[in-house]
Amino acid sequence: MTKQSLQALIQQADNASMLAVEGAKLDFALDMAKLLARSSLSRSDLAARLDVSLPMVTKILRGDSNLTIETMVKAARAARGKLHFKLTAEDSHCRWFEVLTTERRNATRATVELARPQGRPVNVWNEVNVDETESAAA
């Protein structure tokens, strides 16, 4: 076995699309965890909604399983969400944002106002969809 530099191994994995595949799995798992938290659903709740075992939910949320699109859609719907795919050119940068319904926006605004000191204006755009992973991905 020959020794390869770390950079060469990373390049080899990138050429084989392994990094993109693993990144997509992790993105889905992180998004599912966020969706569960937003929906105030536990893993047990999700298992019951999907009619699967708790270990299967753990498998979904672990981020290392090669899930079918069918499983991903069912899991997203069970967590009160939707699954979206977007294909872009290789050299493009894609950014996602959510547009909130009036009901959800008002509920979010009320939550943000409770957490803020009085007198400061509420900017829902800055408060609602903060993505902790964006700085790492940028």
Image (tube, helix red, strand yellow):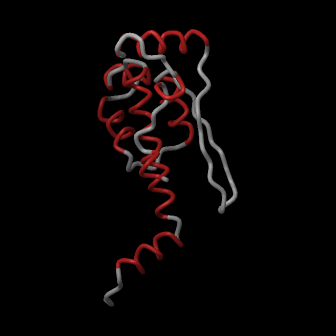
Tally the marks: 0
In the rendered view, does 48 fall on the left or right side of 69? left
Residue found at x 54% / y 26%: 125
Q: Position of residue 12 (x, y in %)?
A: 47, 76
**Looking at the rendering, which quadrant does residue 50 occupy?**
top left
Above-or-below relation of 29 to 119: below
Above-or-below relation of 108 to 1: above
In the rendered view, does 88 fall on the left or right side of 57? right
Residue that extends furthest to the bottom in the rendered view of this protein:
2
Q: Position of residue 116 (x, y in %)?
A: 36, 16
Residue closest to the eye, 44 or 84: 84
Above-or-below relation of 97 to 8: above
Residue closest to the eye, 34 or 43: 34
Residue found at x 35% / y 85%: 4
Q: Position of residue 42 (x, y in %)?
A: 32, 22
Residue that extends furthest to the right in the rendered view of this protein:
89
Looking at the rendering, in which quadrant would you find the N terminus? Answer: bottom left
Q: Position of residue 122 (x, y in %)?
A: 48, 18
Residue found at x 48% / y 23%: 78
Residue closest to the eye, 129 or 61: 129
Residue closest to the eye, 40 or 1: 40
Residue that extends furthest to the front in the rendered view of this protein:
119
**Looking at the rendering, which quadrant does residue 90 occupy?**
bottom right
In the rendered view, does 73 fall on the left or right side of 53? right
